[in-house]
Image: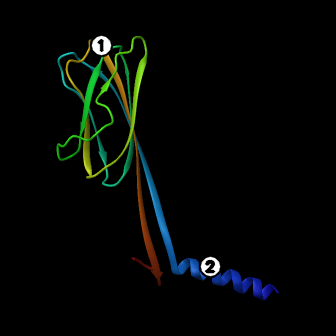
Amino acid sequence: MRFFTFFVISVICLIGLGLSSDAEAKTTKYQEKLNCQTNADCSSTFTIPKGAKATLTISVATSDNINFKMENPNGNNVRLSTSSFPDMSGFTQVFTRVMTADVAGDYTFYFLKPIPQNFEATISVVIEDTETRNTRYTKNNPTEL
């Protein structure tokens, strides 16, 4: 009986070594607090790999209507479900959007003028880049399938 148990465990281990799937999930967190001037550009840039999922959370502490946009590395607008924070007096406004990067590179989030006096914003981005590779090991030589 011990031999049979040892045999089964050995076969399972050998099968596991012969073909495996590596799923690497790299999570990158980016956060920036902006203190923007009324007549100055106000933006934040972060890098997203192609195909990665990015969760953007932007919060502003103002009651003014704030317009914004985001551009991909090619300079094209990234479609967001809204392009402004509504007028709300006395509240911190939060916008959250989940997107998948269509191209790799630097994405820039812009607050558009006019920017209210003493404007502060926090931009947080959580980037989840998942790469799945099937790898076959042959005598210490991994090869991608």
Q: CA distance from mark 2 to mark 1?
A: 62 Å
Mark 1 residue type: Asn
Please name the residue shown 64% across and 80% down the image: 12
Q: Which residue is mark 2?
A: 13
56 shown above or below 42: below
**Looking at the rendering, in which quadrant would you find the N terminus?**
bottom right
Please name the residue shown 30% across and 18% down the image: 65
Residue contact between numbered discs 2 and 1, judged by CB atoms under 8 Å? no
Label 1: few (<14), some (14–19) or many (≥20) C-alpha neighbours in 10 Å: few
Quadrant position of residue 2: bottom right
Checking the image for residue 76, the label placed there is: none
Q: Position of residue 103 (x, y in %)?
A: 25, 52
Mark 2 residue type: Cys
Could one spot residue 37 in this view of the protein?
Answer: yes
Which type of secondary structure does the marked residue at label 1 adopt?
A: loop
Q: How many marks?
A: 2
Between 79 and 135, the residue placed more toward the observer is 79
Q: Which residue is mark 1?
A: 118
Q: Position of residue 137 (x, y in %)?
A: 47, 80
The residue most toward the right is 1
115 relative to 98 in the view: left or right: left
Q: Position of residue 110 (x, y in %)?
A: 24, 31
42 shown above or below 115: below
Label 2: few (<14), some (14–19) or many (≥20) C-alpha neighbours in 10 Å: few
Which type of secondary structure does the marked residue at label 2 adopt?
A: helix
**Looking at the rendering, in which quadrant would you find the C terminus?**
bottom left
Name the N-terminal-most of marks 2 and 1: 2
Please name the residue shown 28% across and 52% down the image: 102
